[in-house]
Image (cartoon, helix red, strand yellow):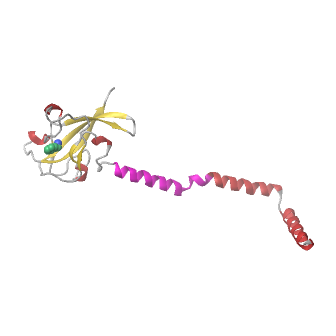
Amino acid sequence: MRSLDRLFETSARALASRTSRRSLLAALGQALTGAALLPLLPIARGSRAQAADARSKTKGPESCEYWKYCAIDGYLCACCGGTSTSCPPGTGSSPITWIGTCHNPDDGRDYIVSYNDCCGKTSCGNCSCTRNEREKPLYRPSRNNDLNWCMANADSNYHCTVSVILGVAEK
Ligand code: ABN
């Protein structure tokens, strides 16, 4: 047991003679700085960016849950070769439309949105989306959106619907 004590004492003294207080403080400082910088490593930021990307895909222009579609009734043009604001090639926008007011959760504002039908081809059939917020039943025809807004076009075939922001709704 005494020889074990002596062994530890000798090695502790040898280490103390080789290590200064300054080098001990420097090592401690490096360890603390490293720990503080850990959350900034790209791995952490990458995983957060991936989660945001996945969220935007489920609630983006090809999803019926997208905020701009709150009063839509039709096929989403974003799933039919167009975008949420432009008609697919070979179709034209209806001049008469349905108007809604939708809340944008990203900036907390309400926007006036026009739902134009795209006309000139038969029904697209992709991404059917019927939300119709604040719509009234069919017996109030002027407040009902279950209409083919292509009725005034030369080719009244309905293909899909776009949603165009007209402005911010004033309170
Ligand atoms: N506004 C889209 C639509 C077209 C035809 C019939 C009902 C709704």
Q: Which residues are magenta?
A: 37-59
Tell me if residue 119 is in the magenta stretch: no
Along the viewing direction, whichever of 56 and 165 lies nearer the viewer? 56
Q: Position of residue 95 (x, y in %)?
A: 15, 37
Give the residue at x 40% y 52%. Answer: 53
Along the viewing direction, whichever of 110 and 21 lies nearer the viewer? 110
Quadrant of residue 31 within the rendered picture: bottom right
Relative placement, left or right, of 13 versus 35 is: right
Give the residue at x 53% y 55%. Answer: 44
Q: What is the residue that sits farthest to the left in this orientation?
A: 154
Relative placement, left or right, of 27 versus 57 is: right
Q: Position of residue 91 (x, y in %)?
A: 15, 48
Q: Position of residue 113 (x, y in %)?
A: 26, 36
Give the residue at x 23% y 41%. Answer: 72
Above or below, 67 against 50 in this view is above
Along the viewing direction, whichever of 74 and 169 lies nearer the viewer? 74
Q: Position of residue 85 (x, y in %)?
A: 25, 44
Q: Which quarter of the rendered image does ligand 1 occupy?
A: top left
Q: What is the residue that sits farthest to the top in this orientation?
A: 171
Give the residue at x 83% y 58%. Answer: 20
Tell me if residue 49 is in the magenta stretch: yes
Which quadrant is the C terminus positioned in?
Answer: top left
Relative placement, left or right, of 106 versus 138 is: right
